[in-house]
């Protein structure tokens, strides 16, 4: 009889070992993807700050001068088309100004709303490494806490809510002890990890398709040729600004001559 019991239990034990190995594998992949994405976010954020300081502020200055030219042309021509051009130019100038100066101030003044703080605490109470049952779970919870901290710093409510829902789903839908219950819990954890990997891959694809990412890659390519692309862009913009100032003074003189 004991031998028979061992034979009956062995398939479950083997399946459980396989699932645990599979879970460890997908969690390793997930950790790698999260690390890669965090590095990409940091690289793009640093580059965007440099771009705004070197180039973005010059675009804002150029668009403001263009808007002032269009507004003076309203005084010169007095037509509806001139007023429309002036309105569009001022709108564009405001957008460029906000892009160059608004985001930095917004980041400095970020104050998480109470709902986000409450959500983060709810997540932390469930995934803190101190609550882990073994070393493997402690490593996993450490990675989850890092993800939660990053989501909190970005104000990413969606990610925190998904983490909380995942924990509740596993805790409430698969109760009990034994190999069968453990297999179901691990299977759900694998599905969640695979879903998170797919989400991270999609976010990476979206980031790499953004304008700032394309400019970053172009700047990196130029650097390999010993060129500073942002400095080149800034030099070109300064020339355009000088030309725009000349055109503004010209239109301004025309307006004053009509008075």
Image: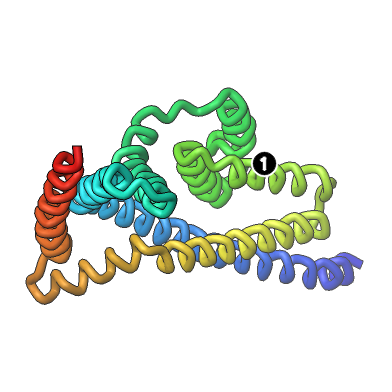
Q: Nearer the viewer, residue 116 or 4?
A: 116
Left or right position of 54 against 88: left
The residue nearer to you, when weighing 240 against 208, is 240
State the residue in front, 104 or 133. Answer: 104
Quarter of the image that includes the N terminus: bottom right
Q: Quadrant of residue 68?
A: top left
Residue 131 visible in the picture: yes
Q: Is residue 109 above or below residue 133?
A: above
Viewer-proximal residue, 202 or 178?
202
Q: Residue at x 54, y 34 (%)?
A: 130
Answer above or below: position of 222 versus 212. below
Relative to residue 6, is residue 206 drawn left or right?
Answer: left
> Compared with residue 35, is residue 115 higher up or lower down, i.e. above or below?
above
Which residue is painted at 75% across and 48% down in the image?
170
Residue 219 image position (x, y, % from top left): 21, 67
Position of the C terminus by quadrant: top left
Classify residue 210 as left or right of residue 10: left
Secondary structure state at the residue bearing disc 1? helix
- Callout 1: few (<14), some (14-19), or many (20+) C-alpha neighbours within 10 Å? some
Residue farthest to the front, as pictured: 259
> Which residue appears at 81% of the width and 53% of the height?
178
Q: Is residue 92 visible?
A: no
For the point 36% across and 45% down, the residue is 90
Q: Position of residue 244 (x, y in %)?
A: 16, 53
Most extreme residue toward the left is 226
Q: Say how many tags the image has.
A: 1
Q: Which residue is mark 1?
A: 164
């Amino acid at each position: 009889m004991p031998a028979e019991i061992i034979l009956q239990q062995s398939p479950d034990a083997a399946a459980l070992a396989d699932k645990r190995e599979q879970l460890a594998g997908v969690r390793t992949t997930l950790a790698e993807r999260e690390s890669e994405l965090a590095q990409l976010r940091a690289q793009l954020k640093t580059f965007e700050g440099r771009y705004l300081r070197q180039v973005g502020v010059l675009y804002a200055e150029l668009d403001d001068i263009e808007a002032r030219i269009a507004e003076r042309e309203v005084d010169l021509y007095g037509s509806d088309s001139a007023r429309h051009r002036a309105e569009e130019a001022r709108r564009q100038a405001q957008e460029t100004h906000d892009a160059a100066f608004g985001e930095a101030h917004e980041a400095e003044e970020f104050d998480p709303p109470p709902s986000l703080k409450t959500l983060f605490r709810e997540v932390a109470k469930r995934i803190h490494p101190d609550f882990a049952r073994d070393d493997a779970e402690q490593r996993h919870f450490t990675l989850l806490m890092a993800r939660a901290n990053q989501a909190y710093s970005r104000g990413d409510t969606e990610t925190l809510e998904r983490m909380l829902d995942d924990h509740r789903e596993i805790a409430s839908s698969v109760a009990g002890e034994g190999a069968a219950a453990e297999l179901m819990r691990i299977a759900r954890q694998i599905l969640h990890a695979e879903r998170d990997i797919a989400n991270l891959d999609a976010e990476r694809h979206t980031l790499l398709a953004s304008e700032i990412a394309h400019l970053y890659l172009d700047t990196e390519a130029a650097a390999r040729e010993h060129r500073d692309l942002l400095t080149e862009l800034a030099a070109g913009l300064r020339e355009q600004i000088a030309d725009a100032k000349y055109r503004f003074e010209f239109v301004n003189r025309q307006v004053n001559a009509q008075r």
